Image (cartoon, grey):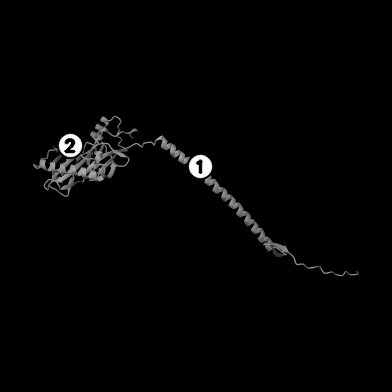
Amino acid sequence: MAKAPLPLPSLLVLAAFFFHHPCCTAQGRAENISEVEAAVRARASELLRDATSQLVDLPLPANLSGAGVRASALSVRSNALWAGGVNTTGFTVPPRVVPVPFARRLAIVFERFVGNSTAAFAAPQRYALAAPVAGLLAYDASAGPDARVSLRALGAPVRVEFKDDLSAAAALDKGFEFDATTARCVTFAASGEVVATHAVAPGSACAVNGTGHFGIAVLLPETPPPASAVRARWWAWTVGVGAGGVLGASALTLSVAGAVSWTRMRRREEMDRRAMAGEELGRMTVRGSRMPSAKVVRTRPELEERS
């Protein structure tokens, strides 16, 4: 796991802005990515008119190249792509890959956002981008720069390599340590938001199926709260426990007192019931109280024999 504190790679903080205007929202990211894609498509269509199979660098406008966007492209027939694939620096498109929808000749574009990638792409929560975001795009060369197609791998997946980028980041920042067990490969949507993550492949690479923008994100260490916040939480917890204890003791006392009073009342009622069931004398009420009473009968005198 990365050592705490884990500083962000210096390679990712070379500029405060990615393009000529700041980008903070998903809409701004989408606009910046669309600007890059439009420029890349136009240059790729212009330079690949001769259907060359050699990889060529794409010169981009100054505002993009100055911000660290690098792109290259090549033209390849779909049958050659199926048979032999494409292997270039940072990307490996294996054999048994077909374009969807089908196109006879493809223009494959490779991108690297070596500037501040975070200005165009958002890292997952609690993660930070550890290497420049890479883009793999494909177009129907015979249909113009707007005919984008996807690459479907029917065999081995496409590999996007990040080893050199991570090594460069470690060289610029000695405190940076890459841990493949906690790092994640990230797939980005056209808006720059994360749409999927998966484990990093051996060799610090991402195995993907299709085209798009991909990156590697590392887990950020948890920052401990300041001492003042800890003391405040401890004080609040202590007060809460004390108040809860007082309320609990009061409730227990009232419960015990109520139970004792109820028990005594039930005993008196039981004694009264038993007395009522076995009485031989009459009962009379005096000022709300029932009292035993007997009839006032005088004993009749009897004469004794030989009296």
Residue 123 image offset from top left, x and y in percent: 28, 41
The answer to whether any part of residue 196 appears in the image is yes
Going by the numbered disc 1, the residue's amino acid type is Gly
Q: Residue at x 46, y 41 (%)?
A: 237
Q: Which mark is residue 242?
A: 1
Q: Residues within 10 Å of mark 2 (few under 14, many from 20)?
A: some
Q: Residue at x 44, y 39 (%)?
A: 233
Question: Which is more toward the observer, 211 or 242?
Answer: 242
Which image quadrant is residue 230 in?
top left
Residue 111 image offset from top left, x and y in percent: 19, 39
Left or right for 215, reference 61: right
Q: Which mark is residue 260?
A: none
Which image quadrant is residue 184 in?
top left
Q: Secondary structure at mark 1?
A: helix
Residue 160 image offset from top left, x and y in percent: 22, 39
Q: Secondary structure at mark 2?
A: helix
Instruction: Looking at this view, name the residue that lies furthest to the right.
Output: 306
Q: Quadrant of the N terminus?
A: top left
Q: Residue at x 16, y 47 (%)?
A: 148
Instruction: Looking at this view, name the residue that lies furthest to the front.
Output: 287
Q: Residues within 10 Å of mark 1 (few under 14, many from 20)?
A: few
Q: What residue is disc 2 on? A: 65
Left or right for 283, reference 242: right
Q: CA distance from mark 1 to mark 2?
A: 64 Å
Going by the numbered disc 2, the residue's amino acid type is Ser
Q: Quadrant of the C terminus?
A: bottom right
Left or right for 85, reference 247: left
Q: Are marks 1 and 2 in contact (CB under 8 Å)?
A: no
Q: Which mark sits nearer the N-terminus, 1 or 2?
A: 2
In the displayed structure, would residue 192 be above or below residue 172? below
The answer to whether any part of residue 156 appears in the image is no
